[in-house]
Amino acid sequence: MAQSMRGLNPPKTLKPNLQLHNHRVPSNPFFTPAKPISRKFPTTSLSVMAVRNQHQDQQQPLSLDTLVNSSRREELSGAIRTSLPNCLSETNLQLTVPGLKSKTRGKVRDIYDNGDYLVLVTTDRQSAFDRILASIPFKGQVLNETSLWWFDNTRHITPNAIVSSPDENVTIAKKCSVFPVEFVVRGFVTGSTETSLWTVYKKGVRNYCGNALSEGLVKNQKLPQNILTPTTKAADHDVPVTPDEIIKSGLMSQDDYEEASRKALSLFEYGQRVAQEHGLILVDTKYEFGKGRDGSTLLIDEVHTPDSSRYWIAHSYEECFRNGLEPENVDKEFLRLWFKDHCDPYKDKVLPDAPEELVCELAWRYIFLYETITKSEFKMPSTEEPIHDRISRKVALALSSLK
């Protein structure tokens, strides 16, 4: 479960019309061109299913053109820009909802204790590098509703802690004993953060979290099989650990670790199948688990969201890989790369403002991913009632019904 953070940057004031070094936005708004990679290429093969374009009747592969030039994008662009000043960056339900005992501020979620239940409010805060980078319009709603869809569709693999969702940004969950381990599952050699597989591999690491890695792997290459690279928390950053270290240090028992590991790999394989059916590649993700009062292992936090997961467009993956281009992605990686190009996000005390163009692009990609996976239209929230008042009212009503 999300933990409180120290030393977070305050919400950013967006800086419009910024010229983006190496990530300049061309005439088509928000679009970031692929970046070449210098390397040799092994032979790979990836079968891609033709999928239904969510806004057209005919069958065709999902493509970057769908992401960049769709009428749906134009339909939402005005609402996204209008909402930039009104993002949900902070909540204080402990002051407005009777019975909430305390607040824990995570990277993205504000978590409130109600005794038997937890109230999780997914805000619009954007996190990467263990920092808050910006606030993204509608992001909290997208993440919450994406997770709920996956929670509902993975019950055949594992039970979860979800009780209800009284508001677009809110989930009420059963309390459980959270395992202090994040189960990160990877299908490709990629990433830009310090704990990403590509970052450690290019530094010469050939055994990572108990996984032996062969020589000659290159960036964005598909792994022979999915691997689990668990992490645990130290201060405000993730620390890779091996299964033996987890068990010997007492973070989890061997039985609990093995059960959670099996579930994590099964969830990832299922997520990959669903993503492929919708023209996407689920590249990597992370899961969190807890033990319920009845002793069962429960899936918690979030599932296969664009915050916790990396998604590529399947149709163009092989061509991009052969030509040394970054895969066309539908996640926050392009924003991570922008910050790495413009600062040291791990060491700099103050980060540059996220460009408005990239903030709007990320908002659209999150909505696009939600609609592509769920085949449901994202519903814009009502603006008749201030968002904090709306959430407070709905949470208070939901909690009263649980008594």
Image (cartoon, helix red, strand yellow):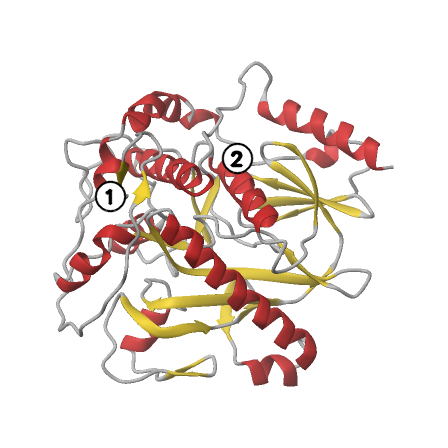
Q: Of the numbered discs in the image, which one, if any, rests on residue 277?
A: none
Residue flagged by tag 1: what amino acid is it? Answer: Ser
Task: Check disc 2 and report its element: helix, strand or loop.
Answer: helix
Instruction: Report if the CB atoms under discs 2 and 1 are less than 8 Å apart.
Output: no
Note whether 47 is above or below 120 in the view shown.
Answer: below
* Residue 258: percent from left, percent from top: 62, 77
Residue 398 falls left or right of residue 141: right
- The residue closer to the viewer here, 273 or 145, is 273
The number of numbered badges drawn on the structure is 2
Task: Check disc 1 and report its element: helix, strand or loop.
Answer: loop
- How far apart are labels 2 and 1 at the CA level? 25 Å
Mark 2 residue crowding within 10 angstroms, few (<14) / some (14–19) / many (20+): many
Residue 301 falls left or right of residue 286: right
Q: Of the numbered discs in the image, which one, if any, rests on residue 141?
A: 2
Mark 1 residue crowding within 10 angstroms, few (<14) / some (14–19) / many (20+): some
Residue placed under numbered mark 1 in the picture: 63
Residue drawn 66% across the image and 35% down it? 92
* Residue 63: percent from left, percent from top: 24, 43
* Residue 229: percent from left, percent from top: 47, 73
Mark 2 vs mark 1: give the one in front: 1
- The residue closer to the viewer here, 248 or 129, is 248
Extreme-right residue of the structure: 403
Is residue 342 visible to us here?
A: no
Residue drawn 18% across the image and 74% down it? 42
Residue drawn 39% across the image and 60% down it? 346
Residue flagged by tag 2: what amino acid is it? Answer: Gln
* Residue 251: percent from left, percent from top: 66, 75
